[in-house]
Amino acid sequence: ITIADRRIRSLFIFSRGDDGLEYFQLHATPALRRAGVRDFVQHVVVEGAGHTFRPRAAQAALRKLLIDFVASQDCRADRSTMGKKA
């Protein structure tokens, strides 16, 4: 998980049964045991979502996950710059 080594926060979102989830679990699970990786890499499985995130409820869940993730990054950026002079 080179992404985590670079301290890049990442969110992986899968639907249940997606081949990408199986691949992620196979390759990421050992790395996720390391605290440095767990702090930067998150993954979520959206139940009831097909590969294209249908039905609409799955699309709404995906939208909320993405918005919340992006908003949390803005908060982290704000905190990291607090007290620093421009």
Image: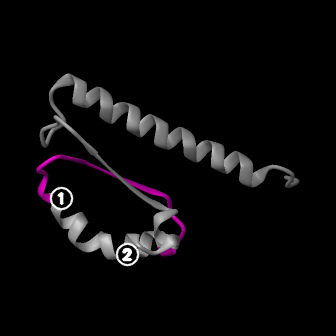
Q: Is residue 7 magenta?
A: yes
Name the kind of residue labelled 2 in the image.
Ala
Total number of numbered discs in the rendering: 2
Q: Is residue 3 left or right of residue 48?
A: right
Among the two numbered marks 1 and 2 on one chain, the one whose residue lies closer to the N terminus? 1
Element at label 2: helix
Residue 84 in the image, given as x and y percentages of width and height = 85, 55
Disc number for residue 20: 1
Q: Residues within 10 Å of mark 1 (few under 14, many from 20)?
A: some
Q: Residues within 10 Å of mark 2 (few under 14, many from 20)?
A: some
Are dots 1 and 2 in contact, CB under 8 Å? no
Residue 80 in the image, given as x and y percentages of width and height = 73, 54
Q: Is residue 38 left or right of residue 80?
A: left
Name the kind of residue labelled 1 in the image.
Gly
Q: Residue at x 64, y 43 (%)?
A: 75
Using the image, determine if residue 22 lies above or below residue 53: below
Q: Residue at x 21, y 38 (%)?
A: 47
- Which residue has dot 2 on it? 31
Element at label 1: helix
Using the image, determine if residue 44 lies above or below residue 6: above
Q: Which residues are magenta?
A: 5-19
Q: Is residue 79 magenta?
A: no
Residue furthest to the top = 56
Q: Residue at x 23, y 24 (%)?
A: 57
Using the image, determine if residue 75 lies above or below residue 56: below
Using the image, determine if residue 23 lies above or below residue 42: below
Q: Residue at x 39, y 31 (%)?
A: 64
Q: Is residue 25 left or right of residue 52?
A: right
Residue 15 in the image, given as x and y percentages of width and height = 19, 45
